Amino acid sequence: QVRLVESGGGSVQAGGTLTLSCTSSGYAFSSSCMAWFRQVPGKEREGVASVRANGISAYADSVAGRFTISRDNAVSTLTLHMNDLKPEDSAMYYCAAHRFLSGNWCPVLLIEGDFAYWGQGTQVTVSS
């Protein structure tokens, strides 16, 4: 059975730091493009960052330079280190695995429907 479980969310003041983790099992984590998405009520789920099986990462313009995505294939764990958090970063954050065994590939655009497995989400709230 496939499981992805996020943790690490919480409430912080603007300028603060949080690190999110996603532990997973039941699928080929080491061969999968992994990504973080986020969603606020009334808005579409948006891609935040992705990382290929070999560790090459990509970021949405809104978080580039502040967030770092990484993975540890040995323990099937995805992380998102968030620096200089802003109120507009407040959202439910989800980790997800792409539907394909992509190996050293991730799509340029992160489309929700292209990701097969999802965690339950972890809430991040950034106050002014």
Image: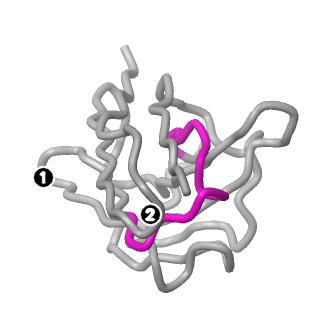
The answer to which image quadrant residue 68 occupies is: bottom left
Q: Position of residue 2 (x, y in %)?
A: 40, 21
Tell me how many marks there are: 2
Mark 1 residue crowding within 10 angstroms, few (<14) / some (14–19) / many (20+): few
Residue 9 on the magenta segment: no
Q: In the image, what residue type sits under mark 1?
A: Ala
Q: Are marks 2 and 1 in contact (CB under 8 Å)?
A: no
The dot on residue 103 is: 2
Q: Establish if 115 lies above or below 84.
A: above
Q: How is the image coloured?
A: one colour
Q: Establish if 127 lies above or below 5.
A: below
Residue 109 placement, left or right of 115: right
Instruction: Tell me what residue is drawn at x 53 percent, y 70 percent.
Output: 105
The answer to which image quadrant residue 7 occupies is: top left
Q: From this viewpoint, which residue is outermost toward the front?
A: 128
Rounded to the nearest angstrom, the CA distance separating label 2 from label 1 is 15 Å
Q: Secondary structure at mark 1?
A: loop
Q: In the image, what residue type sits under mark 2?
A: Gly
Q: Position of residue 69 (x, y in %)?
A: 39, 66
Residue 88 on the magenta segment: yes
Image quadrant where one finds the C terminus: bottom right
The dot on residue 74 is: 1
Which tag is nearer the camera, tag 2 or tag 1? Answer: 1
Instruction: Tell me what residue is drawn at x 61 percent, y 34 percent.
Output: 116
Residue 63 placement, left or right of 123: right
In the rendered structure, which segment of residues is drawn in magenta?
82-97
N-terminal label among 2 and 1: 1
Q: Establish if 108 lies above or below 119.
A: below
Q: Position of residue 62 (x, y in %)?
A: 67, 74
Mark 2 residue crowding within 10 angstroms, few (<14) / some (14–19) / many (20+): some
Instruction: Tell me what residue is drawn at x 47 percent, y 54 percent.
Output: 34
